[in-house]
Amino acid sequence: MSLLFERWIPVRLSDGRRDVVAAFELARPDIVAFDAPRADFNAALFQFWIALLQTVTTAQNRREWRQWLLSPPDADTLKALFAPLAPHFVYDGDGPRFMQDHALRAKDGEPVAIANLLIDSPGENALRNNGDHFTKRGRIERLCPHCAVLALYTLQTNAPSGGAGHRTGLRGGGPLTTVLLPPPVAGRPASLWQTLCLNLLPVPLFNQVGGDANCAEQILLFPWLGPIERLQSKDGALAPAQVHPLHVYWAMPRRIRLDFDAVQPGNCDLCGEPSERLVAQYVTRNYGLNYKGAWDHPLSPYYQVKDEWLPLHPQPGGIGYRHWQGFVLGLDNDKQVRRSARVVSAFFEDNIERDHRTELRLWAFGYDMDNMKPRCWYESVMPLYALGDCGPREREALRHDIGAWVGGAELAASYLRNAVKDAWFSGDARGDYSFVDASFWSRTEPGFYALLRERIAAARDNVDWDPVARTGGWRGQLRQAALRLFDKEFVGAGPVHAQNPARIKAAHEQLRRNLDGPKLRDALKLPAPPDAPKNKPARKTARKAT
């Protein structure tokens, strides 16, 4: 019952059909994507197989890595690579179980419904208050073993706050993950193998995440192989230096054991497949592994607070172009310092020969968590164009320009939000106006990516670029989008009898003054025109964009 030799992985083939394959078949060229019944499961599958391939790879440099990428191993080779690890990926039986507490048994606690493994299941408070309006109780009662294990791995990987002693993961609850995606080949999707390998690091580079790469004890890599006391003392914590570097991919903050004694036949409530052993419950105990210290997960971007680097998490409003620079190139300004995920930065910083004009993409995903409550699952695929063909100097120039473009867009969004608010209400009316920002970011996204593509092409091909003219054009797009949204979709679209014309006129005039004023030009790093009229400055009460 090892996950490395059973056929359990749902995949999509290049012809659109769905299949279920074993781990040693993942290098097949016709497999192009995972195809699980939930978005967070697909994201978890990506992380699981990146972790597994990183665990077995022997590539010592980028050239060896590239050979693995372009010349996939056959099934027999993968079987031989996976065989030593197969006993560690057993999910049932009396011995160690994958991602399950070594000491727990079914008799050691009250059974918990299997649905509680799913992050979006209503919690006890929601059930008590009859607050499960959108995510209903009773949807999931029994899972096939493979869906149960995948739900368990998804929970361990995202590990939101779960109450007293129920730990979050080493990236906190609901981390943001970024994965590189290859471009299509001859108009067809790239193979899943290429996608997975694109997110691997040569062994010496990976080991820089911290830890002891020479440690021989397998429990320091796979924490479910022994009792928790062998990794940390009671009321203690676990730091990177205490374990193998690969532990970062196999972290296990929750103490859970699936109950394979109380099973019954039927169809899985998630995938719909028949099974003789549907899992209905599990047992859990608090005070699992307590991850503290400078953990550095290779698939997550980080931000700096004083001298500490913390992992980014999705926030309300989703993932859009305003995050592109922080996820890809990193940020370093007066407001914030961010660095891209180690896998992303390593790909762009190495000097290996690449295919010219290769246009990669970046897939960013994760849960937006409010403590233990998921507000939303966000994911977005961002174009990277031919950024890999740009050198460090060109990337630094890009960082400067993109920072100005996004800074100007944030200011314009705040002007629009405040104008809409002033047109609708008198005084300082409170409420959630994030929909205004979301509309603005959505409306200006095509223009941003068109500008970004031109800028990367200019940097790559070493052709002249007029920053004043191009940024001036971007300023015009921001201005047009803000005014159009105010006039046509928010304020102007409202019923006439319910509006206050004087208040609308004042808000509209102020919006124009702000959009034409010096603050927006300064944010975009545009010089003031010599014959520019002296506009009334933007309101000091203009709120910052989120």
Image (tube, rainbow, N blue to C red):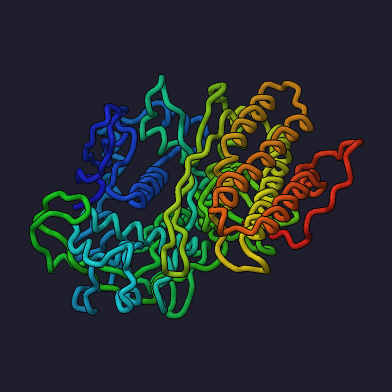
Residue 506 occupies quadrant:
bottom right
Q: Is residue 466 above or below residue 11?
A: above
In-front residue for pair 493/459: 493
Q: For this rendering, which residue is in front, 243 or 134?
A: 134
Q: Is residue 117 left or right of residue 493?
A: left
Residue shown at 62% from the left, 68% from the top: 429
Q: Residue at x 45, y 60 (%)?
A: 174
Residue 13 location (% of width, % of height)? 28, 32
Q: Is residue 114 visible?
A: yes
Nearest the viewer among 175 and 294 is: 175
Q: Is the residue 381 above or below the residue 120 in the image?
A: above
Task: Please state if 208 lies on the left or on the right of 423 as rendered.
Answer: left
- The residue sitting at 78% across, 58% down in the picture is 539
**In the rendered view of the protein, which quadrant contains the C terminus?**
bottom right
Q: Is residue 272 left or right of residue 421?
A: left
Q: Residue furthest right?
A: 530
Measured from the top left, where is residue 237 in percent x and y? 49, 73
Estimate the x, y position of residue 387 in percent, counting from the top left: 60, 31
Task: Tell me which residue sits at (26%, 61%) in the image.
Answer: 97
